Amino acid sequence: MNTDQVEDMHRACGSLMRQRDLLAKRIGGIELAPVSMAEDLSTVLLAIEAVDRALADAGHPYFDAGN
């Protein structure tokens, strides 16, 4: 991966993490959350893992001390 691709992947991971946080907050605020929201969260978590794995394979693991 070149530098631009690594930066794109880092931004993608950050965006997915924000989506994860938003979904978790929404799920936590509902008395009986629909299963579909948990499925959405699971999908986002898998996507984060895939991006992180791609970065690690390229020798540029994602790390953000703020997350």
Image (cartoon, rainbow, N blue to C red):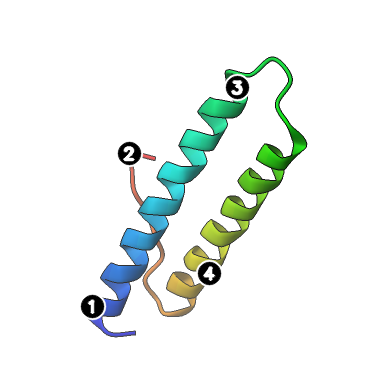
How crowded is the residue under tag 1: few (<14 C-alpha within 10 Å), some, or many (20+)? few
Q: Earlier in the sequence, mark 3 or mark 2?
A: 3
> Position of 35 compared to 45: left or right?
right
Mark 3 to mark 2 CA distance (whole Å): 21 Å
Q: Name above or below for residue 7 compared with residue 23.
A: below
Name the disc covering residue 28, or none: 3
Give the residue type at disc 4.
Arg
Closer mark to the observer between disc 1 and disc 3: 3
Give the residue type at disc 3.
Gly
Identify the residue shown where x is 46% and y is 71%. 56
Name the disc covering residue 39, or none: none
Mark 4 to mark 1 CA distance (whole Å): 17 Å
Mark 3 lies on a secondary structure that is helix
> Position of 8 compared to 37: left or right?
left
Give the residue type at disc 1.
Asp
Q: Position of residue 65 (x, y in %)?
A: 33, 42
- Pointer 2: what residue? 66
Tell me whether circle 3 and circle 2 mark residues in contact (CB < 8 Å).
Answer: no
How crowded is the residue under tag 3: few (<14 C-alpha within 10 Å), some, or many (20+)? few
Identify the residue shown where x is 38% and y is 61%. 12
Q: Earlier in the sequence, mark 3 or mark 4?
A: 3
Mark 1 to mark 2 CA distance (whole Å): 22 Å
Mark 1 lies on a secondary structure that is helix
How crowded is the residue under tag 2: few (<14 C-alpha within 10 Å), some, or many (20+)? few
Mark 4 lies on a secondary structure that is helix
Closer mark to the observer between disc 3 and disc 2: 3
Closer mark to the observer between disc 3 and disc 4: 3
Q: Earlier in the sequence, mark 4 or mark 2?
A: 4
Tell me whether circle 1 and circle 3 mark residues in contact (CB < 8 Å).
Answer: no
- Pointer 1: what residue? 4
Name the disc covering residue 53, or none: 4
